[in-house]
Amino acid sequence: MKTMTEETAFLLMKEQGWHPMPCDTPVPVYDVPASCGLPLPLGNETNDFKMVPKGILASMDTFFVRAKGDSMIGANIIDGDLVLVDKTAPVYDSDIVVVLIDGECVLKCYCTDDEGQTWLAPRNDAYDAIPVREGQDLFIFGVVTDVWRKSPRVSHRECIDVVNRTKRRARKPKEVCLSEVEAMVRAMAGSIKTGRLWYAVFRPLVDLKFYAWNAYGEFVGMVRSVVPDHEHLPSEDGLQRMATGSFTKSVGEWKESNAPVKNKRFATYKSTAKQVFRVLGVEM
């Protein structure tokens, strides 16, 4: 795998219309929850610093504090987010502020109503606004200027599923001939206990491009000619009824959550389809 310098990466991003900024400025992080209050005033100590691009800072007198709760979800601030607070910014109506009120620190919208009453308003209809009364002990730490969320991640298994699906689509399927398919049908017949289970034989042949996705009649005719005395022969209607949900996709994409059969029956269909590939000598 080739590597590149940060400078080269930045230049390439700029060429493609991106506007990257280096994280070159330390901002203190007060890792105590701001109820969205802080159980205590912020104080003068911090346990950590986060490097941020200088260009996003309106002033150098800023800090991060962690949001807690769900009262600001309407402003796209959720539990665990880091909010960037500017201590020098002027406060205007509708600004989101970190406020110390009566010894409790909260994260709310600052606003004044038509009657001149000041409120600290949440952005969640499940909570009421907090009125600021005359003579009440109030201190505004600063105005929220940005919200930082923990980088989203998906499971490794989900990533590998996408990679494997891409590989399958790019791989040229092995060409199988009629004699090989007929031999496979004879080999599989003993494990087929219901007429509809033949769908688990038909779908792999679709994946291998031996049949079109809707060539049920052609497949049924072939099976009936190869194993005419089989106790559970397929029917076009029976196969068509199975072509729903994830069963309309390639075998590698079958998911029980969206399949026409569940539990042990799903496992039987999946294992039967895999066995078809093995008998034909094809990698699934």
Image (cartoon, rainbow, N blue to C red):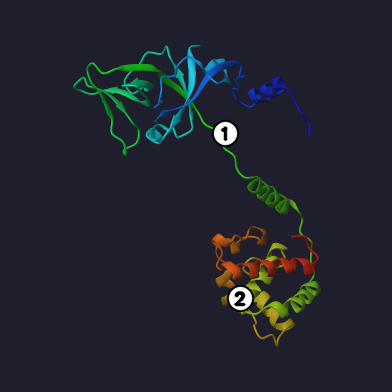
Regarding mark 1 in the picture, which secondary structure is present there? loop
Q: Name the residue under label 1.
A: 151
Q: Which residue is drawn at 54% across and 16% down?
A: 55
> Quarter-wise, where is residue 124 in the image?
top left
Along the viewing direction, whichever of 4 and 86 lies nearer the viewer = 86
Regarding mark 2 in the picture, which secondary structure is present there? helix
Q: Which residue is drawn at 61% across and 76% down?
A: 196
In the image, what residue type sits under mark 1? Ser
Question: CA gap, disc 1 to disc 2?
Answer: 46 Å
**In the rendered image of this protein, does residue 141 appear above or below residue 226?**
above
Q: Mark 2 points at which residue?
A: 196
Pick the quarter of the image with the C terminus.
Answer: bottom right
**In the rendered image of this protein, does residue 158 appear above or below residue 134?**
below
Q: Where is residue 98 in the image (x, y as percent from the top left)?
A: 39, 22
In the image, what residue type sits under mark 2? Arg
Q: Earlier in the sequence, mark 1 or mark 2?
A: 1
